[in-house]
Image: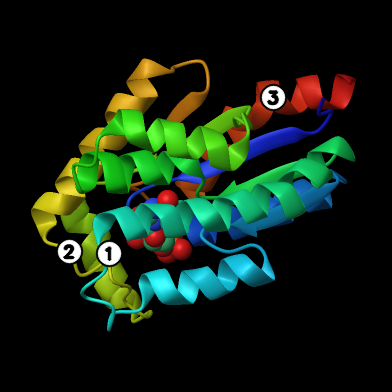
């Protein structure tokens, strides 16, 4: 039984997700919400160690099955150690990526069977589904250009071909269409202030319900 509110942020690489997560967190904190911000892969000591392994550009030989199990192992630890306890304590958890990244990248992107991914994910998270998923939508061309311009460290998945990122985006849109009650699609190809306003607006109903509890 959880009393908190679990919100995830999703988006292709270069969607501005990390900056938007920071701005959203500042806004929520300023309003006094009991906020926990976290990210995947990572969010725990063990998860950050797994992140280093799974994103290492030198690990070109990594099997797709190993990749999904590593992401899922990090997620299992994250849920057990951080997310579930925070929700049980009535916190608002804002998480930068969660299992939908696995469906979009390993499922639609790599072509691994979604049924298997769902089974592994279910085992890892023990049924913990976000209350709301905010998806920052951007075309891969724009996203990857932004990512290159930002000068940040490129990970193993950034280096995938454009076609891979096209499949990831199409996957996200398919996931959102299948569960419209949980997902909000935000157009991320506009100035950051506008994206932030849209994110805040998308949260309104859930925040009202959370405050009423
Ligand atoms: P980010 O921290 O910059 O969002 O990058 C995380 C990368 O990891 C991004 O390329 C997507 C990828 N990823 C997966 O492929 N599967 C997953 O389950 C997760 C959480 C991330």
- Nearest to viewer (mark 3 / mark 1): 1
> How far across and down, in percent of the image, does residue 18 sit?
51, 60
Assess mark 3: CB under 8 A from ligand 1? Answer: no
Q: Label 2, on which residue?
A: 160
Assess mark 1: CB under 8 A from ligand 1? Answer: yes
Vertical order, 147 against 137 (above or below) = below
As drawn, is 24 to the left or to the right of 82? Answer: left
As drawn, is 195 to the left or to the right of 146? Answer: right
Mark earlier in primary sequence (3, 2): 2
Q: Label 1, on which residue?
A: 157
Badge 2 local density, few (<14 within 10 Å), some, or many (20+)?
few
The quarter of the rendering in which ligand 1 is drawn is bottom left
As drawn, is 179 to the left or to the right of 113? Answer: right
As drawn, is 165 to the left or to the right of 19? Answer: left
Cα–Cα gap, marks 2 and 1? 5 Å
Q: Which quarter of the picture shows residue 129?
A: top right
- Please give the name of the residue rendered at 76% of the width and 42% of the height, measured from the top-left corner: 84
Q: Nearer the viewer, residue 83 or 72?
A: 72
Q: Are marks 3 and 1 in contact (CB under 8 Å)?
A: no
Q: Label 3, on which residue?
A: 206
- SS at badge 2: loop
């Amino acid at each position: 039984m959880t009393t908190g509110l679990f919100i995830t942020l999703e988006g292709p690489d270069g969607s501005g997700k990390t900056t938007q997560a920071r701005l959203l967190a500042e806004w929520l904190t300023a309003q006094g919400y009991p906020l926990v911000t976290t990210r995947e892969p990572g969010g725990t000591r063990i998860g950050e160690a797994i992140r280093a392994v799974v994103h290492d550009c030198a690990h070109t030989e990594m099997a797709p099955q190993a990749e999904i199990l590593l992401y899922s192992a990090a997620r299992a630890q994250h849920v057990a150690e951080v997310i579930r306890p925070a929700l049980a304590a009535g916190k608002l958890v804002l998480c930068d990526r969660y299992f939908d990244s696995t469906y979009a990248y390993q499922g639609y992107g790599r072509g691994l069977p979604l049924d298997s991914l769902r089974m592994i994910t279910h085992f890892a998270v023990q049924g913990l589904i976000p209350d709301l998923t905010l998806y920052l939508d951007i075309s891969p061309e724009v996203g990857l250009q932004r990512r290159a311009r930002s000068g940040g460290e490129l990970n193993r998945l950034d280096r995938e071909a454009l076609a891979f990122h096209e499949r990831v985006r199409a996957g996200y849109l398919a996931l959102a269409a299948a569960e419209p009650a949980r997902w909000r699609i935000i157009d991320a190809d506009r100035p950051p202030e506008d994206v932030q306003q849209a994110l805040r607006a998308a949260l309104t109903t859930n925040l009202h319900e959370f405050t009423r509890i």
